Image: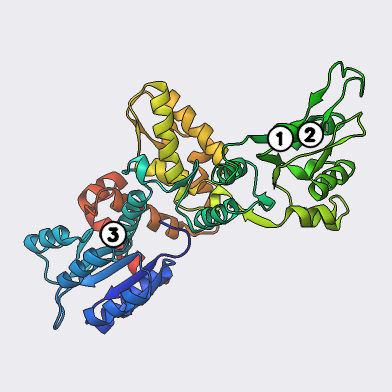
């Protein structure tokens, strides 16, 4: 499931049914479209990307089954759910064979409707996540993986940046993959056969950074017993990646600016300059423009670096990329450890999807590696996840709901877990079927 509201189209020749279903689904935070027949539905499908179509079976002129076939043949990313007031085993079987994910018989409760919609969209989320695909089908670019809109923009920007020698500034939170993006640019460019030299500006003491970048001659400072070239010399003909450039002091910024302007490097302790052919890629997890306004980063250097900007979104804003990456790391670490690749339960996947990931892709990678090492069976369930992740979905719901709302949600989840079997759900809930029916009726009648 991608980020944002899910788009659902309801197709039914009954105006009352359309109004009731639209009201209930809108209250559940879905974006809802309606159509009184198949012809109108097809027009909406042609104009609007949809996540789910809920269609009646028997309608005048063109049946719901024909609509299901049309959707399956032309809109592979759109799910279908069939509803009908004339239920039969044969009809249900035919609907499923044709391509419907769910077959719901009228009359049904709001809870049954929402549970079915949730199941269909959740199945779609898992299927589109790539968990059932091979690594070859996972969208990737030189190690970067993702199919979200944000990552598609990154891939396009990398392609454009690779075709030039312009300086690139890559921004994003720690752990989002800024160095991977820089490597992708370098190894897709005409400089790919030359060195790629990564430098963590924040990890080198201020007193040593100039020497590390530009080199030094023998005797330039205490301990300089030999001359040594710097990172810029090592990257000659290739690319230097200056990570966390915002940590560079103002004094060093002046010297870097001079290199950008003159394409020449002067070793510490020397008066001679040496011309270098180096492309500069820089990255930061801070707001450089904000630092410029505070006088902590040179404005002229900022504009020199900010010729092309690539923004890598935090993992929490990348939707199903979380599941794509989880599968990628699961495959990788299972192969490295020589273990059969375990699989995630649906509940575990939902916990991964809803977690905030403050450490971004790096945190996800570490979590999956630990799960592969520590899990003995072939299934990774919610109980195997770190505790913070296990309860993130619960924590994000807040404490603003009434007891009745919480109870209704729990009953809905139990029903969904047993595919709508009310007898089994009543057993799990510790109540009889009559009580369950009464609770469902009250939930249906309660105001949205």
Q: Residue 275's spot in the image, x, y percent? A: 79, 40
- Location of mark 1 (residue): 199
The residue under label 2 is 213
Q: Is residue 64 left or right of residue 205?
A: left
Callout 1 touching callout 2 (CB < 8 Å): yes
Q: Is residue 133 above or below residue 380?
A: below
In the foreground, 120 or 72:
72
Q: Residues within 10 Å of mark 1 (few under 14, many from 20)?
A: some
Q: Quadrant of residue 253?
A: top right
Left or right: 375 in relation to 157: left
Q: Is residue 262 left or right of residue 31?
A: right
Q: Quadrant of residue 445?
A: bottom left
Q: CA distance from mark 1 to mark 3?
A: 52 Å
Tell me: 429 left or right of 4. left
Q: Nearer the viewer, mark 1 or mark 2?
A: 2
3D distance between C-alphas at marks 1 and 2: 8 Å
Q: Is residue 163 above or below residue 107?
A: above
Name the residue furthest left. 90
Scheme by which the image is coloured: rainbow
Labels in figure, total: 3
Q: Estimate the spatial distance between the alpha carbons at disc 2 and disc 3, rounded to whole Å.
A: 60 Å
> Circle 3 — which element?
helix
What element does badge 2 sit on?
A: helix
Mark closer to the observer (2, 3): 2
- Residue 31: which quarter of the image? bottom left
Q: Tag 1's secondary structure?
A: strand
Quadrant of image for the N terminus: bottom left
First in residue order: circle 1 vs circle 2: 1
Q: Which residue is mark 3?
A: 116
Towards the viewer: 235 or 443: 235
Label located before the other in sequence (2 or 3): 3
């Amino acid at each position: 499931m991608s980020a944002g509201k899910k788009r659902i189209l309801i197709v039914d020749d009954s105006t009352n049914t359309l109004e009731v279903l639209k009201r209930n689904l809108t209250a559940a935070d879905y974006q809802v479209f309606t159509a009184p027949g198949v012809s109108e539905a097809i027009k909406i499908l042609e104009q609007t990307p949809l996540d789910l179509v809920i269609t009646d079976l028997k309608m005048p002129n063109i049946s719901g089954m024909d609509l299901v076939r049309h959707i399956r043949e032309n809109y592979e990313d759109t799910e279908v759910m069939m509803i009908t007031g004339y239920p039969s085993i044969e009809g249900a079987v035919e609907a499923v064979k044709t391509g419907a994910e769910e077959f719901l018989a009228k009359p049904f409760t709001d809870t049954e409707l929402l549970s079915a919609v949730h199941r269909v969209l959740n199945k779609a989320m898992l299927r589109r996540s790539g968990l059932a695909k091979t690594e070859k089908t996972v969208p990737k670019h030189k190690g970067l993986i993702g199919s979200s809109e944000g990552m598609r923009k990154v891939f396009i920007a990398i392609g454009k940046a690779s075709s030039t020698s312009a300086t690139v500034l890559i921004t994003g939170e720690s752990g989002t993959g800024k160095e991977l993006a820089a490597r992708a640019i370098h190894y897709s460019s005409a400089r790919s056969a030359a060195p790629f030299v990564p430098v963590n500006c924040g990890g080198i003491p201020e007193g040593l950074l100039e020497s590390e970048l530009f080199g030094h001659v023998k005797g330039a400072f205490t301990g300089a017993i030999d001359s040594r070239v710097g990172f810029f010399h090592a990257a000659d003909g290739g690319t230097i990646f200056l990570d966390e450039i915002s940590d560079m002091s103002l004094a060093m910024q002046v010297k870097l600016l001079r290199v950008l302007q003159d394409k020449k490097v002067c070793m510490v302790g020397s008066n001679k300059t040496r011309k270098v052919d180096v492309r500069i890629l820089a990255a930061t997890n801070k707001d450089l423009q904000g630092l410029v306004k505070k006088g902590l980063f040179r404005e002229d250097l900022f504009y020199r670096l900010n010729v092309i900007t690539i923004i890598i979104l935090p993992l929490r804003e990348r939707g199903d990329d979380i599941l794509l990456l989880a599968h990628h790391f699961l495959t990788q670490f299972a192969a490295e450890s020589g273990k059969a690749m375990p699989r995630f339960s649906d509940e575990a996947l939902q916990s991964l999807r809803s977690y905030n990931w403050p450490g971004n892709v790096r945190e996800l990678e570490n979590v999956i590696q630990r799960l592969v090492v520590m899990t003995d069976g072939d299934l990774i369930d919610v109980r195997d996840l770190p505790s913070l992740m296990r309860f993130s979905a619960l924590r994000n719901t807040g404490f603003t709901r009434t007891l009745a709302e919480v109870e209704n949600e729990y009953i809905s989840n139990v029903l969904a877990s047993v595919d709508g079997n009310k007898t089994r759900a009543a057993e799990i809930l510790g109540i009889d079927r009559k009580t369950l029916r009464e609770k469902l009726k009250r939930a249906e009648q309660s105001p949205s």
